[in-house]
Every structure is written in C-alpha cells, then in structure tokens.
Image (spheres, rainbow, N blue to C red):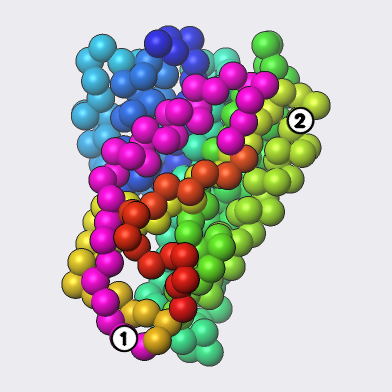
Amino acid sequence: MNANKIALVTGAGSGIGRAAALALQGAGYSVVLAGRRESELAATAARATPSGGPTLAVPTNVSQPESVKALFARIHETFGRLDVLFNNAGINVPAIPMDELTYDQWSSVVGVNLTGSFLCAQEAMRMMKAQDPKGGRIINNGSISAYTPRPNSAPYTCTKHAISGLTKCIALDGRPFDIACSQIDIGNAATELTERMTAGVLQADGTLKPEPRMNLKHVADAVVFIANLPLDANVLFMNVMATKMPFAGRG
C-alpha cells in the first residue's frame, strides 16, 4: 500500500485518466483528480475503492498557468507534497488535411497537450525539489503518435513528438533532485475516443480499416507499475498497445 503517497492525475474525468486515477487510488495513493469538467471528476471519485486512498477533485484547465498554479497550491495546502504526477490531459481535433487546419485548432491542441504538460511538470518539479524527503516521479502520456503519425494528424502528432523531448529534459534536469520521469506510449486503448476504430480508421494507403483495441486496465496497471518503482529505478519509455494494431510497418 502507498498510504502516505500523493498522486496527481490530469484529465482524470474520463478514459485513460479516470482508469489510471482509480488504479492508483486502489493501490493506496491519495489521488488528486484534475480536469475541466467538475461533474466528471465527481463521477471518477464516486467509483473509488472504499479500501483505497482518499481523492480530491480540483477543476483545472491545464493550458492556463494560473489554473495550474491554483491546482498545485491546493495540493500543497491539502497534502504538503506530491509523489507522482501523471501528465495525461490531452485533446485532439478532427482528422483533416494540414492545409485546412485553423490556427485556433492548432493552438488548442498545443495548449493542452504540450503547454499543459509543461506547466504541470514545472509546478511538480518545484514542489518535488522543495519537499522533504525531496523527489518524485512524473509520468507523461505520450502515444504511438510520438513515433509515427496517422494521416491528417499534424497537431496531435507534433505535440506527442514534443512530449518525448519534454520527457528526456525532465529526466535529465530532475536527476540531481531525485525526480524521475517516464513516458507511457499507448496504442488503441478501449475508450470512448477510440470507439470509432471498430468501424474503420483511415490508413496511410487511403483505405478504411477497423483496428483492434485493448482493455483499458492494462494501461492503468502500467501506470501503477511505473509509479511504484523506487526513485533509483526508471522506465524512461514504455509502449503498451493492442498487439494486432498497425504500428510496426504503419504506412
């Protein structure tokens, strides 16, 4: 059990964030649930395991610096420290050709996926460096798209490639302060957002093909595994994917 450990999960109101938050809570962590929709954070908290750790829901827009600062102030006020950050919040826009993207569409994805991850990591590092005992772990949600794109996915793919650079920078800059950083790259977890894949997804050759998905539990279990590692051990990158999805050889 991790009764004295505090974890923060962004995007905790649905999908991967909800599953990871509940898995960490079930493993004994006190879990801070961050996300834009207060009602969905409450729905996540309502599913918590009675024997697990407590939860704290804090509505947050990770793309806004003041909202992120308020989130971390609440964590410090309530718990006094942070042991794990799962930088999970992310959005996408419809799959349209790059030349048809609007600036607002591009900016919205960059604001949440990249700037939001940076802002949360920055505040987490500040807290982890100052707390006693110092240190902690940051886990970034990358994607298969951190390696190779799907058709018409420029904003999402660019931000996920950038997350890989952010992960390496955090791992390097956090090293003197016992701050470990990991990235989990997920492929076709069964969430509402990937439901459309069962009907057919645009492939690089222009065809539409259904793609297999995997149980969301495997992602949540992987997050808990990484979170539970001692700070002198790290998984820098982990790929968890549906075995038969098109990735090796994509395109």
| Residue sitting at x 44%, y 34% | 223
Check residue 192 for magenta coloring: no
The one of 56 and 114 positioned closer to us in this rendering: 114
Check residue 208 for magenta coloring: yes
Mark closer to the chain start, 1 or 2: 2
Give the x, y percent position of residue 140.
55, 44
Element marked by disc 1:
loop
The one of 103 and 246 positioned closer to us in this rendering: 246
Q: What residue is pinned by disc 1?
A: 207
Q: Quadrant of residue 91?
A: bottom left
| Residue sitting at x 34%, y 54% | 243
Q: What residue is pinned by disc 2?
A: 175
Are there few (<14), some (14-19), or many (20+) residues within 10 Å of tag 2? some
Left or right: residue 204 versus residue 195 is right
Q: Disc 1 or disc 2, which is closer to the eye?
A: 1
Residue type at the position of mark 1: Thr
Dot label at residue 184: none
| Residue sitting at x 67%, y 21% | 232
| Residue sitting at x 74%, y 45% | 169
Q: Quadrant of residue 224?
A: top left
The answer to whether residue 59 shows anywhere in this view is: no
In this rendering, is residue 96 above or below 54? below
In this rendering, is residue 244 above or below 120? below
Residue type at the position of mark 2: Arg
Give the x, y percent position of residue 63.
54, 53
Q: Which residues are magenta?
A: 206-235
Q: CA distance from mark 1 to mark 2?
A: 45 Å
Give the x, y percent position of residue 78.
49, 17
Give the x, y percent position of residue 162.
64, 59
Are there few (<14), some (14-19), or many (20+) residues within 10 Å of tag 1? few
